[in-house]
Amino acid sequence: MDKASLKNYPRFTLGDTITKEQLDFFTKYGFVHFTGVFSPEEVKEFILGYEDAQAKLIASKDKVVNGIPVIFGHDENGKRIVQRFPYTSQWSERIHKMAIDPRIQGFRQLLHQKTARVAEDERDGVVFNHYVNSKHSRFKQMGWHTDSLREVFYGKKVYETLNIGIYLDNSSAINGGLRILPGTHRQGLFGMLFTKMYYRNTKEDKNEVLVEATAGDVVVHHGHMWHRVGHSEHKDGVSRRRIMYIPVLCGPKHKPKATTNKKKTPIYHHLQAFAKFDE
Ligand SMILES: O=C(O)CCC(=O)C(=O)O
Ligand SMILES: [Fe+2]
C-alpha cells in the first residue's frame, strides 16, 4: 500500500481472534483500526464511569494519582473537569470491567509475547483523555511523540508496547483527530528519539495519516510509532474529543506505583507538562 492510499487505510472487524491479515497490517504499519467494537450503550457506560471517577477525584482534592499528575480544566460551561485522568480503572468499576473484557485482552495477540499484559496498574494505567477547545480548557491538542519515551528515560530495555485507544466520541479533523506516521515503529531507537521534537512540535507532517473513527471503534497503535493529536478549529461542544487508552506492556512487571501523592513524578512527565499543552 503506498502512502497516498494509506490515507484511506482499511478498517477491520474484530472476531474471536486476531486474523493473519490484521496482524500483518499491524506489523507493517504499526496500527490497526477496528470498527464497532463497543456498542453505543457500552460507550455510555464508560463515559458514566469516567464521570463518577471524576466526581470522586475532584472531591478528594488529589492532584496526582500514583505519582502521575492529573490535568484539570474547565469545560465550555465552566464546569471543572478532569482532562487527563491516569489509572481511571482504579476509580471506576465500569472501566475496570472494560479492561478485563476478552475483546480488550485479545489485543495482546498483536505482540506475540508470553509476558504481554493489559496493564491497569503500571505506567499510567487506563488513561482517559478529554479534549475540548474552550476558554478555560487546559487540554486542546498533543504534540508529536511516541509512547515509549518513558522506557528510554528509565534506561531500561525498550520493550514493545501497545496502546489500545477506545473512541468515545466520533473523531476527525473537526475535533482535532489522531495523526499518525505509519511504519515509524520500525525505525529503531534513533528514530524514536529524534524524528521530531517531543511534544513541542505540533505541526502537520506531509506523511501523516488522520485516523477518522466513530464512537465504539478501537484503534491500537505500537508504542514506538510517532503520533500527535490535532487542535480543533471549532470551539466548545463541537471540539470535544474523549478517548481512553489502555497500555499493553511486556517484559518484567513494572513496580506498582505507590498510592501516595508524595511519590516522585517521573522525569518524562515534567517534559510533557512543560511542552504539551497550550493555554
Ligand atoms: O488522544 C489521542 O488519541 C492520543 C493520546 C496520546 O497520544 C497519549 O495519551 O499518549
Ligand atoms: Fe501517545
Image (cartoon, grey):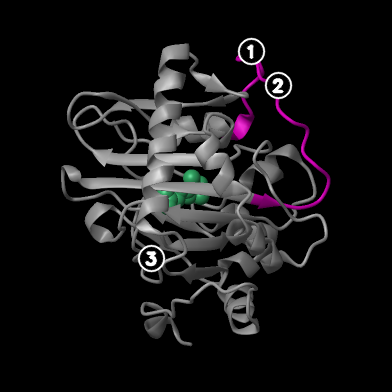
Q: Residues within 10 Å of mark 1 (few under 14, many from 20)?
A: few
Residue at figure coordinates x 77%, y 41% from the top left: 155
Which residue type does callout 3 highlight?
Answer: Val
Q: Would you identify the image quadrant in which residue 222 lies?
A: bottom right
Residue 10 drawn at (x, y percent): 44, 80
Residue 223 visible to an observer of this rendering: no
Callout 2–callout 1 Cβ contact below 8 Å: yes
Q: CA distance from mark 2 to mark 1?
A: 9 Å
Residue 121 drawn at (x, y percent): 67, 36
Mark 2 or mark 1, whichever is nearer to me:
2
Residue 25 drawn at (x, y percent): 57, 79
Q: Residues within 10 Å of mark 3 (few under 14, many from 20)?
A: some
Q: CA distance from mark 2 to mark 3?
A: 35 Å
Residue at figure coordinates x 44%, y 36% from the top left: 49
Dot 1: what SS? loop
Q: Which mark is residue 211?
A: 3
Residue 201 drawn at (x, y percent): 41, 49
Q: Which mark is residue 278?
A: none
For the magenta stretch, what is the residue range?
Answer: 248-268
**Mark 2, residue position:** 258
Q: Does 251 appear in magenta?
A: yes
* Relative to 269, residue 55 above or below: above
Q: Is mark 3 within 8 Å of ligand 1?
A: yes
Dot 2: what SS? loop
Residue at figure coordinates x 49%, y 75% from the top left: 13
Residue at figure coordinates x 37%, y 52% from the top left: 41
